[in-house]
Image (spheres, rainbow, N blue to C red):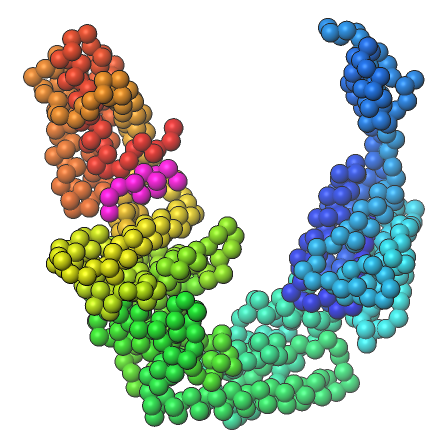
């Protein structure tokens, strides 16, 4: 069986595209080969800045012959039907055979497709792959129509057998396949021939090209860490940067340079960000002090002066960059010490957050107000929480963050410390953006948690207020991420809070700005009443009653807008929560059963209920009880529909005739005595266990008792008993939503 070697040689491929491009080459070629009837033993793809390569081992020599019988119309069918069948099958009338079947004689076409050589199939598949390659961006060059990420120069395509190797003939827009490739652009210019993958890889290495990106990355890291260790330093780990740098060089040469003494007092994050984003340098720190003192750069060639000229040039460019950072840093520090952070916060009144939601300054005011309301629930000092919220975004106006947007939040902490603000405020400045994703750390300090919650809830309510919700895969304002952030902040900090109250309050603040005729007093009074009553509806009714006879147009406008938005946003939280809990192994129907219960805006209690229900359903008693509940509910629902009445007026034990019926009455009374206080104490595990204990009496009841008895008194009493089962179980969770 032959082995296949493919190389597509071009001008430099962007590093960020290389890994996916190699995977795309492998999948498209191998899938195409298999679809055409070839099989193979294994395949591997490779990439360098100037080439994509693919090896396919153990390829079959040709595709198998195929013989297919295709059933056609009856022999006496209209001529046009027969002609259509002939065209579709690609055969002549004389090639048809006739067979007797139940409904008469039928035409069959025997279609024979001879196998094709591997060379023919490879050429066809590779041309299609090249012409339809899924580059994120591509270009045309010269007079041809071919598009590639950068001009494509060579196509190497060789089949290697035990008796030698052959070029697979291929011509794509004048680029003719061959067995030639090139080594390093500067250290080994010129073309050379290859006969197999092993020959290809070995000759490339002699020509100063390391084909495997992982091998280049390993070599870079090993050499970098060795050089740093020799100087008593260590390289700051950055796997993303390592992968990118490995994609920038074919022959990595690691060089360690020095950072000017005047820049060493810059925050290490500033040094690291500047070097990574602008120069693709690794940071090298002193483990004793944590200071960034040197850098690692990776050259793409060896030089006679061992990289001295390269290092000198890099250090010159870096110094110029860091000089700007130093100027910004010192200027910002001076302003923070002299004027505090409020001057920056005030200046954000000139920065638009969203054209419908006002400026960043407007947003800060809303977040500060909400943070103060959240603080007691979270366990934070209200004054500190409000103070932190008012300065948390001040660094957006700093020169350093303007230059390095990646450092927002972190610089806020530095500036807060410089301004002499409490340490809790500085921590909130840095941490209030978190968590940014499912794996990001979650703040635990009370003030930080408070401001982070206020920030995210304000974002969500704001965009809900203006009907800018995520649609499908589109989420331009990262609202799904914000909702997940709220969920993680609540759950991982063990917070018990009713989201409804705070969603309603913040929607009122937004709608007060958006709806004409709403006064500041309307907003203030509504928020005060929401804090008192917990939800918008009760707050609205209270104010309406207080203002009997007075103008309430603003309130009425709010009433028609806020509740629907609030319900919709809470449903959005529940959808995000479902995804979050599914990843933790909690069944979707269990989550739905708990979301259906009252108090579902308290996410911590909702999750506690869901975990307890999942645990119970994992037991035999729990699983069987659900079946008993559903049986009781189905019988009861059918009877209520038939009779046009609701059987919920209380069953009487004195009408019980069967011992199993009496036992069920006793079991329900005992369960209720345990469930009611457990639910009051939010002890869901105890409540669920009490519910599961009903399994035996419920099963025994259905085995021994006929619910729809002939005597009407017995029937009504037993239906009311089923209603007691339903009522008792539904206190704990909506078992109607449990599947199975």
Q: Which quadrant would residue 248 be assigned to in this image? A: bottom right
- Residue 565: in magenta span: no
Foreground: 656 or 119? 656
Going by the picture, which residue comes out furthest to the left?
654
State which quarter of the image contains the N terminus: top right
Position of 78 compared to 444: left or right? right
Query: Can you give x and y, in whole percent of width and height, for residue 481 in the image?
Result: 43, 59
Determine whether 27 is above or below 654 in the image: below
Q: Quadrant of residue 415?
A: bottom left
Q: Residue at x 86, y 52 (%)?
A: 158
Q: Is residue 67 visible?
A: no
Residues drawn in magenta: 588-599
Residue 117 lies, with reference to residue 225, above or below; the image says above
For residue 525, which quarter of the picture? bottom left
In the picture shown, does residue 431 fall above or below 700? Answer: below
Viewer-side residue, 614 vs 130: 130
- Quarter of the picture containing the C terminus is top left
Majority secondary structure of magenta residues: helix
Q: Is residue 215 left or right of residue 630?
A: right
Say which residue appears at 20% left-offset and 44% top-offset.
683
Residue closest to the eye, 82 or 318: 82
Count of numbered marks = 0
The image position of residue 383, as x and y in percent, is 22, 75
Depth check, front residue: 605 or 689:
605
**Measured from the top left, where is residue 28 in percent x and y?**
73, 48
Image coords of residue 182 (percent x, y) = 84, 66
Residue in the picture at 35% in, 71% down = 363
Say whether residue 284 is left or right of residue 28: left
Q: Residue at x 16, y 41 (%)?
A: 678
């Amino acid at each position: 069986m032959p082995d296949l070697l493919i190389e597509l040689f071009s001008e430099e491929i962007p590093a960020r595209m290389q890994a996916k491009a190699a995977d795309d080459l492998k999948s498209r070629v191998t899938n195409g080969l298999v679809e055409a009837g070839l099989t193979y033993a294994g395949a591997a793809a490779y990439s360098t800045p100037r080439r994509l390569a693919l090896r396919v081992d153990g390829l079959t020599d040709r595709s198998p012959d195929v013989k297919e019988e295709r059933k056609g119309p009856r022999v006496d069918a209209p001529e046009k039907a027969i002609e259509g069948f002939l065209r579709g099958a690609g055969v002549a009338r004389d090639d048809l055979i006739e067979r007797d079947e139940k409904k008469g004689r039928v035409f069959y076409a025997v279609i024979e497709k001879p196998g094709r050589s591997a060379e023919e199939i490879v050429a066809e598949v590779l041309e299609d792959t090249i012409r339809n390659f899924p580059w994120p961006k591509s270009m045309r060059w010269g007079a041809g129509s071919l598009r590639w990420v950068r001009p494509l120069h060579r196509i190497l395509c060789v089949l290697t057998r035990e008796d030698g190797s052959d070029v697979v003939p291929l011509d794509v827009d004048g680029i003719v396949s061959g067995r030639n490739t090139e080594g390093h652009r500067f250290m080994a210019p010129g073309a050379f021939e290859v006969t197999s993958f092993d020959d290809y890889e070995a000759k490339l290495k002699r020509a100063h090209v390391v084909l495997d990106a992982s091998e280049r990355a390993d070599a870079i890291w090993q050499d970098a860490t060795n050089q740093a260790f020799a100087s008593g330093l260590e390289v700051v780990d950055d796997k993303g940067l390592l992968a990118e740098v490995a994609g920038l060089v074919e022959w990595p040469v690691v060089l360690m340079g020095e950072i000017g003494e005047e820049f060493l007092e810059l925050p290490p994050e500033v040094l690291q960000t500047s070097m990574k984003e602008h120069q693709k340098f690794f940071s090298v720190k002193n483990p004793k002090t944590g200071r960034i003192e040197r850098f690692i750069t990776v050259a793409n060639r060896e030089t006679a002066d061992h990289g001295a000229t390269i290092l000198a040039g890099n250090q010159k460019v870096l110094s110029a960059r860091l000089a700007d950072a130093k100027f910004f840093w010192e200027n910002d520090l001076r302003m923070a010490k002299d004027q505090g952070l409020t001057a920056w916060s005030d200046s954000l009144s000139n920065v638009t957050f969203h054209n419908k939601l006002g400026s960043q300054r407007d947003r800060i005011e809303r977040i500060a107000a909400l943070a103060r309301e959240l603080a007691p629930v979270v366990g934070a000092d209200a004054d500190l929480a409000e103070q932190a919220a008012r300065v948390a975004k001040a660094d957006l106006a700093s020169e350093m963050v303007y230059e390095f947007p990646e450092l927002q939040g972190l610089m806020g902490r530095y500036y807060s410390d410089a301004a002499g603000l409490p340490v809790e405020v500085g921590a909130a400045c840095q941490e209030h953006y978190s968590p940014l994703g499912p794996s990001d750390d979650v703040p635990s300090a009370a003030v930080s948690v408070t401001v982070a919650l206020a920030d995210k809830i304000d974002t969500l309510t704001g965009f809900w207020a203006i009907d800018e919700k995520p649609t499908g895969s589109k989420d331009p304002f990262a609202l799904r991420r914000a909702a997940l952030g709220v969920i993680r902040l609540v759950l991982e900090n063990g917070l018990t809070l009713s989201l409804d109250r705070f969603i309603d309050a913040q929607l009122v603040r937004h709608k007060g700005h958006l709806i004409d005729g709403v006064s500041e007093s309307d907003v203030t009074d509504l928020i005060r009443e929401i804090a008192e009553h917990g939800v918008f509806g009760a707050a609205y009714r209270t104010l309406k009653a207080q203002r009997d006879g007075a103008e309430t147009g603003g309130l009425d406008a709010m009433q028609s807008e806020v509740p629907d938005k609030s319900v919709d946003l809470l449903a959005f939280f529940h959808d995000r929560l479902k995804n979050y809990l599914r990843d933790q192994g909690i069944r979707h129907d269990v989550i739905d059963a708990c979301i259906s219960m009252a108090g579902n805006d308290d996410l911590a209690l909702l999750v506690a209920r869901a975990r307890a229900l999942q645990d119970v359903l994992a037991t035999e008693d729990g699983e069987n009880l659900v079946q008993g509940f559903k049986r009781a509910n189905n019988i009861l629902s059918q009877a209520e529909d038939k009779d046009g009445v609701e059987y919920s007026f209380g069953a009487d034990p004195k009408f019980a005739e069967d011992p199993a019926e009496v036992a069920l009455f006793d079991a329900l009374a005992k369960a209720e005595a345990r469930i009611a206080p457990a639910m009051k104490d939010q002890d869901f595990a105890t409540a669920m266990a009490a519910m599961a204990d009903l399994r035996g009496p419920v099963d025994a009841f259905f085995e021994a008792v006929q619910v729809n008895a002939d005597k009407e008194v017995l029937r009504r009493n037993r239906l009311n008993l089923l209603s007691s089962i339903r009522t008792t179980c539904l206190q704990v969770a909506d078992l109607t939503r449990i599947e199975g």
